[in-house]
Image (spheres, rainbow, N blue to C red):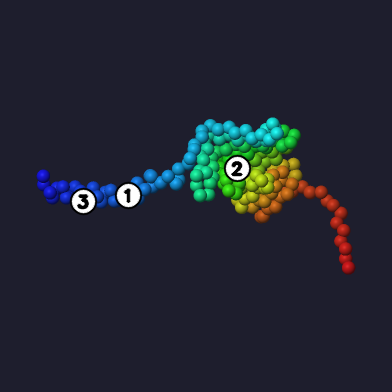
Amino acid sequence: MNWSKFFILTFFCFFSCEDNFQEIKKINNYDNIPIGIAENIKLIYTDSAKVKAVLISPTNKDFTNQEFPYSEFPNGIEITFFDKNKNPTVVTSNYAITYNKTNIVDLVGDVVINIHDGSELKTSQLYWDPEQEWLFTEEKFSFKNIDYDIIAKRLDANRSFTIFNTGELDGKVMFEENEILVNEN
């Protein structure tokens, strides 16, 4: 056997493996692998034998094995909530992620909320705190109902939109005139 050919072949193999070492480490990185993947899911949340919500998604990836656990819905989500009168509110987005430690839901891409009374909110991203029943975003949004037809940037509102804070408002808002008493001293 010719030792020079063996040495050159070994030399090239050693350096070609060294170049791919970082890629091999990435492939074997189990820290970023979900512990479960579910397809075509339909979850029904009930309380006292009453349906409170129905979640539908083509894919759910469970990353609760992470230091900051989360669940991801990379192909979109549709959630239908039912109030005490069984009236539906439908929430859709192209992507969603729920953070287990904070219980915050991040909805991204064509986020639409359709409320049974005809109200509709549209935005590109919306955060939702289900425990506080609170919605917020720093993105541009539109909201239409019987009293509002607005476009604004920044939203901070409760789920029923009875408390509604916004920034840079543009649109129409209906309000009732009330008598204002001024006390001058």
Residue 36 point in image, percent of width and height: 49, 38
Front of the two marks 2 and 1: 1
Q: Secondary structure at mark 1?
A: helix
Name the residue tied to disc 3.
Answer: 11
Name the residue tied to disc 1.
Answer: 21
Please give the name of the residue rendered at 67% of the width and 51% of the height, measured from the top-left corner: 156
Separation of disc 2 and disc 1 at Cα?
41 Å
Please give the name of the residue rendered at 70% of the width and 34% of the height, measured from the top-left corner: 48
The residue most toward the left is 1
Q: Is residue 156 above or below residue 183?
A: above
Separation of disc 2 and disc 3 at Cα?
55 Å
Amino acid under disc 2:
Val
Please give the name of the residue rendered at 30% of the width and 51% of the height, measured from the top-left corner: 19
Residue 90, located in which quarter of the rendered image? top right
For residue 21, side relative to residue 135 (left or right): left
Q: Nearer the viewer, residue 57 or 1?
A: 1
Residue 73, located in which quarter of the rendered image? top right
Residue 116 seen by the camera: no
Q: Residues within 10 Å of mark 1 (few under 14, many from 20)?
A: few
Q: Nearer the viewer, residue 48 or 86?
A: 48
Amino acid under disc 3:
Phe
Q: Is residue 56 above or below residue 15?
A: above
The first of marks 3 and 1 along the sequence is 3
For residue 65, side relative to residue 104 (left or right): left
Q: Which mark is residue 111?
A: 2
